[in-house]
Amino acid sequence: MQRLVWLALCLTLAVPAAAWPQATGLARMTDLWNLPVTAPGTQVFGESSHDRTGLNEDGFAGLFSRLYYEDGKHVLYDAEGPGCVYRMWFTLLNPAARLQIFVDEAAMPAVDADLDDFFAGTAAPFTPPLVWDDVASSGGFVSYVPICYRKRLVIATTGYPFFYNFTAHSYRADVAVAAFTGSEDDAAARSIYDPANAGRDPKDTDGVSYDTADLEIQPGDENEIFVDAGSGQVASLELTPAALTADALADVRLVIRFDAAAAPAVDLPLGRFFGTAVDAPSGSLLIGRLDDTLYCFFPMPYFSAASIRLANDGAIAYAFHSVVGHTATPPDDHAGRFAAVASDSVPTVYGRDHVFVETSGQGRIVGVLQVSAGLSGLGFLEGDERFYPDGLRTPTIQGTGTEDYYNGGWYFNQGTFLLPTHGHPLLRNDGVWTTAAMYRLHLGDSLDFYDGVRFSIEHDALDTATDEEYRTVAFVYRDDEPALVPIDEFDVGDAGDEARFQYSGVGDEAVGPDFYFYEGDSDLVGIFDGGYRTAGEASLSFAVNPFNDGVRLVRRLDQSRGREVVRVWVNGRDAGLWRTSERNTFKRWRDAVFDLPPALTHGERRLEIVLENAAPDRPFTQYRYWFQAWKNPLLGRLAELELTSPAAVLAVGDTLQLTTDGIYPSGNAEEVTGWVEYELSDPALAAIDYGELRALAPGELCVTAKTGALASNEICVLIEETADDDNDDNDDNDDNDDNDDNDDDNDDDAGGGPSDDGDNDDAGGCGC
């Protein structure tokens, strides 16, 4: 019995969790129906010329315009793969500098061109509408041609680049990424991102149905233009007012509700949601205004209900023609729900960023609309954006200026403009206030998060002005449930923690406690910590949920020297290089992230991590670790739990691995064995850990799996006493021929026959 049960356990845990489909490169930019689905294991980060001191020298003199200098090159980006750079922005191009891009450690660059020529838009694939110069993008040079890599990517210039800002994704090792060659088929992307197609739904509209309505909304009324009591997706929303007036855009609110959510996903005046004013059209790919028609093409999934209404807060009636595109195709079980998050800093607060969005759970930010105003000209455009995902203290994106974030430059020195991914539709000065409107979509370069996010922007160079007004709307897909679950935290250098994590080091030099700062919004808050500078290797061990879908390692390091390279081993298997190229001698703390794929961690109850220094000229630093498990299932969305057992009977001392499947409303199932709780009818009979039942005493035991208010079916097993070992005398008697004959006679007399195994079929009849 014990052997059979353990075989079932091994079969259950030996198969890694399936890799989640993850679109990358051009596919990520063009598969807009999948915009709501956040696949696990993406690290969103950027490299830029931002002032490492926290001030405003973001590229004027080039003091911070590189990660490092080597072999005559200013290296701007150096990251381990797999990954993709989705956006490259520059301004103040150095005419003597060549841009060189080295893919997967090739000796020769895949791209080698003068910066001026690169952005001239004449050499494929770096041509419009994926590349724009400083005239089209009002002061900024920007490329949205994705540069993907499997092993490593280095982007460098042969002269000072001054201002630059890149947005990139790093993926887990199990994500398939095709390395950039320059000959990719980008026809679909060019069609979708063509400015001539503004105002048309860029998604595949096969299977989309359209509901139209003409309505007049009286003051105080709220009129419904779409309702569905099932599951599906809103594909598009178009509203044409009888008269496009400032009052109509301000008085009429768009109210959208999905499923059983207590609060609406959208509740905003039309002008604010669509990012438009009468004198400021907006022409982005997914939201804006074409002539007098307001349009939104963000896909909006729902699982049980959807409603779209227009509410009139004004004193007069307003008439509209509406068209709602929708499909009955059920959304992906893991799709995030759409929301428009409004945020106001009126006025701005001294010493604090304006927050675009701060929320818990998992999801992605896919766009931002911003209207800012100040009494001192355009100084508010000096503020830098900062992106903090998953509880990290380090902003993984740190910008160089507000207009730079919106892909412009020099306070939008070419005036207003509208492009599919970004734009500056309004600049107004009424003699007192200077007002600017801006927008940017994050499609290929979506800002993914898995355990909360804070996305913010300085409201001037140093967050000092309090005479400014910021109003923003962030477009987000999210779910309340995080995809990262805390495992443990290790304080390096603490004797108790080192014993608990079985830490050992070779070539450790104790450092600290040091008093340093992180970059970002809280860069004046110092933290004491001590740890090691390690020239050799460090090993540590910790327990983990065997049903994990991967594991994340987060390490606090001292980035004053930069270019730390560590080879990571997991239970004796090579997990790859952990490279941190960033350097900051002023704000020295950094939280660095390394994601382990489920192929290395799923089915393991304990991980032994070995970090081996791979940079011979410098040690790596370690002060503190945080460990997190990836969790794919969304427990809060499940409709049912189904509990099964591979056996109905076991003996005291045996173990039995139960399996729990979660059933989504769509009918799709996903294993949740290690993520639910278990209730035992008699806890004295057995212990249970991650669904593994260990029999302690004989008796009948019934088990139920639970998560929140959801409970599974009940299964029962019979736990028997352990059988006594046979003694030698009995074995000898069994070998006696006479006894064998007698046994045969007894069997025949009993009437059991050769197929009767002597078991009582009713003995295990406990409702299993």
Image (cartoon, helix red, strand yellow):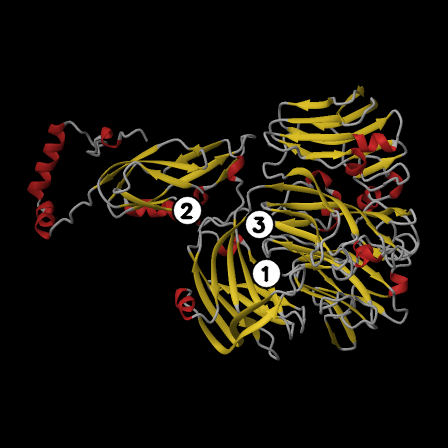
SS at mark 2 in the image: helix
For mark 1, give the secondary structure.
strand
Residue found farthest to the left: 738
The mark nearer the N terminus, 1 or 2, is 2
Q: Which mark is residue 451?
A: 3
Q: Position of residue 278 (x, y in %)?
A: 89, 36
Image coordinates for residue 593, horizontal then vertical, percent: 59, 60
Q: Quadrant of residue 658?
A: top left
Tell me the kind of residue under disc 2: Leu
Decide if residue 136 is on the left or right side of residue 52: right
Q: Name the one closer to the observer, 679 or 98.
A: 679
Question: Marks 1 and 2, Cα distance to the nearest angstrom?
Answer: 31 Å
- Give the image quarter of residue 250: top right
Front residue of 72 and 471: 471
Which mark's residue is nearer the viewer, 2 or 3? Answer: 3
Crowdedness near tag 1: few (<14), some (14–19) or many (≥20) residues, C-alpha within 10 Å:
some
The kind of residue tagged 1 is: Val
Q: Position of residue 52 (x, y in %)?
A: 71, 68
Q: CA distance from mark 1 to mark 3?
A: 14 Å
Distance of mark 2 from mark 3, alpha carbons? 31 Å
What residue does disc 2 label? Answer: 11
- Which residue type carries mark 3? Asp
Q: In the rendered view, would you say 427 is above or below 638?
A: below
Quadrant of the rendering where the C terminus is positioned: top left
